[in-house]
Amino acid sequence: MEYIELSDETKIIGRTLMTRVILAKDCKYGKKGDKGGWVEHLGSCGKETWIADEAMLMGLATLMDNAVLKDNAIVSGQSRVEKNAVISGDAQVKDKATVSGKAQVMGKAIVQGQALVEGDAIIKDDVVMWGKAKLFSGTWIESPFQAQGPVHFVSQSRPDRLYIGCIEKTFLGWITGGYSVAKKYDAHKNNEYVSYENMIQPIIEKYLKYCEDNDI
């Protein structure tokens, strides 16, 4: 680990032994010997990552590339934080979730399940990402739409776009072209598409109202 090494300071969280890290050399994060946060396995850290303040990296979770944990953030489970992602505040990334790109998870936000947050997305406050939700852009102060439909998981990937299963379209795209997709997968035969259509319309209305209220 180029920037991180273990100190002699330890503590027990539940039944887990955590060790405080320190900077191994002068770098962009500070001076050699500066104290950082806590790690369960030093091997979970990449060469240029840093854990600051009282943040914790636990379990089989990994911190790679130039990713940073700080404040009281906790990354655990088998989750991954990579590239230039920053996890801060009291945020949590857990289970098998991934935060990547220039994404930021802050405040009391939680990313869990198999959720993916990347691009320049910022999630904060009381946002909770779960399931197989994917988020690629926008600043979110409340949870993006996520639901398990009759067959596929449905999630808002950007402020004006939805994933249904592995297919992403704009709101308008789903309204105008969604039936052809449903027909291709025989979803129209069991009224599955009708259920999705009922999910989409309220989201569109909510988004349009947000745009109007914020002069977007």
Image: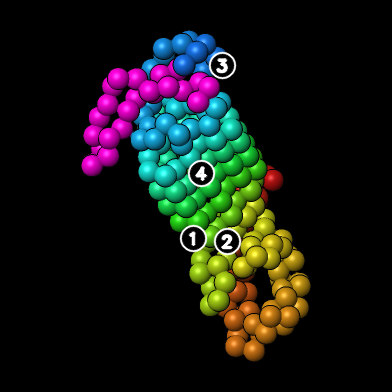
Span of residues in magenta: 1-23
**What is the spatial separation of the Cα atoms under label 2 and label 1, in whole angstroms?**
9 Å
For badge 2, the amino acid type reads Ser
- The 10 Å Cα crowd at callout 4, few under 14, some 14 to 19, many 20 or more, is many
**x, y percentage for residue 181?**
72, 75
Residue sitting at 48 percent across and 10 percent down? 31
Q: Position of residue 71 (x, y in %)?
A: 40, 28
In which quadrant of the rendered view does residue 7 lie? top left
The answer to which of marks 4 and 3 sits earlier in the sequence is 3
Disc 1 designates what residue? 131
Question: Which one is in front in this view, the residue at disc 2 or the one at disc 1?
Answer: 1
| Distance between mark 4 and mark 3 Cα atoms | 22 Å
Q: Is residue 33 visible?
A: yes
What is the distance, in whole Å, between disc 3 and disc 1 at their CAs? Answer: 35 Å
**Residue kind at label 3, given as amino acid type:** Lys
Residue 17 painted magenta: yes
Using the numbered discs, state the Cα–Cα distance from disc 3 to disc 2 in whole angstroms. Answer: 37 Å
Looking at this view, is 140 or 32 the one in front? 32
Residue located beneath label 3 in the image? 28
Which residue is under mark 4? 80
Residue at 65% of width from left, 43% of height from top?
119
Choose the circle earlier in sequence order: 4 or 2. Answer: 4
Which sits in the foreground, 176 or 187? 187
Classify residue 206 as left or right of residue 130: right
Q: Would you name the residue on which mark 2 appears?
A: 155
Q: Answer above or below: position of 55 versus 188.
A: above
Magenta segment, principal secondary structure? strand
SS category of the residue bearing label 2: strand
